Image (spheres, rainbow, N blue to C red):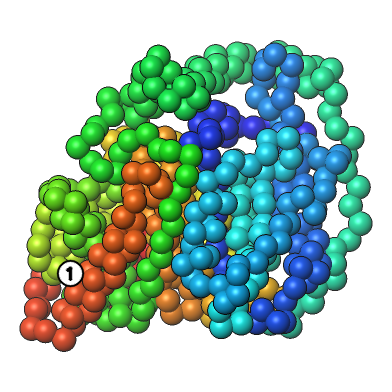
Amino acid sequence: MERLTDSEVSLLALDTVRNPQHLTTVHVFAGDDLFDHDDLVALVRDRLAFVPRYRQRLWSAPAGVAAPVWSDDDRFDLSFHLRRTALPRPGTDEQLREFVGRVSARRLDRSRPLWELYLVEGLTGNRFALVVKSHLALVDGIENVELSQVLLDADPDAVTTGGTPWTPEPPPSPVDLLTSAVLRASQDPSELLAGARRGVTGLLGAAVAMGEATRGGVGGALGELATAALRGTAPAHTSPMLGQASEHRRFATVEIDLADLDRVRERFGHTVNDALLSILAGGLRGWLHTRGLALPTVVALSPMGVTEDAEDQTSAVGCRVVPHLAPLPTGEPSDATRLHQVGIVTQAFTDTGRAVAAQVLRDLAGFAPATLHALGARAGLEATRRRHDLVVTNVPGPQQPMYAAGALLEHSYPVLPLPYGQLLSIGVNSYDGVVAVGLNGDRDRITDIDVLAQCIAEARDEMIMLLGGHHDQQSPDQPDERQGVSRVDE
């Protein structure tokens, strides 16, 4: 048995019907006629040994005297977690996005291992998709990575054996759970204080849940109080990205050529990450204008990777992910000026000397972006009390083709969860020369998420136009040889 950490207990407390706390990843593959459900079953069975937590469920101590523990699910049923569906042929990308919006909004079953994987067949162009949902509590980046990291291979001929026999450990009894809790408290008196903190967290989570259940009235007021306590301030209503989410989501995507961002980096002496954040700022600016709004700054919580201290526990991804506030200059009309303003802010992080080289993250085994997005989302929740409008994660991925049982991965889009009190989140992957942006928004409040996607695409095109113009505002302290920011959000 392995007991949940305090941060993982907080994740569970804030995992509610309106704000389920799982990462969804959408992988689109070529070769619908070369990959079927049997291939998926064999592949997952083969790789589950590398992610043992995906066969474990949560077991709670009697009366909540201690944090829940992870232990094997003695009723583990792979067929429950692997779902098969198909779009009406010919299935369009729009239909896939609608499907993703629906399934990403549903909470995972707490009585089973906290993940699901959907095989979506019938996409146009002889394509299919794998939609993976993993609870943030599953992925700690130390011993437990996200399932996608072990499913995908750089070798199209990687062998799939169908897995080795697995026998679960006996489930813990209530007596076992109670005894281990008492023993832990007797050996570590600080566990009593930790229990008190968990109680406060649970009360806040209950207030959030009550607000959802009653949809207003006293429950709604409790929800507002919980928001204030969690965010460290009363809820702000000046931003259209803040508010109480519904139980439903909309999903949209944008693609950017990584080579274009590299050309911006070389021309203006900023990083790929600077260019990406500048494009997002321009897109948010245009979207706000379509709503008749003008905000000088949108504050993004953009988690970053830092080198591990000597006393830190070595992680599977070679870094720790920490929250970082990045003010996006949405009030600045000039693309070049926005780029320089973003660069000034991010340079301060680079100057700390703790940034992790983007190349290091690209070279991680398997397909690590999903793991890094989960860690970024966790870091964002841990920084809830720091005032911000939305979470943005930007993760460098492998720049060579990846495969699942021989099927070629064409695109991968992250779908970040919405923290309580927020209505929009943005996840970004770079993979094989393409930067893929995933927009996850509340269905009732962000009804124009496709407009936001279009505004980001227009900001992308305007940034690229700078390369062919006569704008050369490179400052002398930003030389061309400056390399990409070494962090999780590349």
Marks counted in the figure total 1
Describe the element under mark 1 as helix, strand or loop.
Answer: loop
When the figure is inspected, residue 327 is found, relative to residue 71, above or below; the finding is below
- Callout 1: few (<14), some (14-19), or many (20+) C-alpha neighbours within 10 Å? some
* Tag 1: amino acid: Gln
- Can residue 386 be spotted in the picture? yes
Q: Position of residue 419 (x, y in %)?
A: 42, 39
Residue at point 12% right, 73% down?
474
Q: Which residue is mark 1?
A: 478
Quadrant of the frame with the C terminus: bottom left
Q: Is residue 477 left or right of residue 110?
A: left
Q: Position of residue 118 (x, y in %)?
A: 66, 59
Q: Where in the figure is residue 449, as x and y percent of width and height?
A: 34, 56
Asked if residue 129 is positioned above or below residue 445 in the image, the reply reads below
Q: Nearer the viewer, residue 334 or 2?
A: 334
**477 horizontally vs 68: left or right:** left
- Which quadrant of the view contains residue 49? bottom right
Nearer to me, 324 or 355: 324
Does 111 appear above or below 205?
Answer: below
The quadrant the N terminus occupies is top right
Image coordinates of residue 275 in percent, x first then y, are 26, 68
The residue lying at 34 percent from left, 29 percent from top is 231
Task: Tell me the residue at 41%/61% (across/down).
Answer: 252
The residue lying at 49 percent from left, 62 percent from top is 97
Residue 43 in view in this figure: no
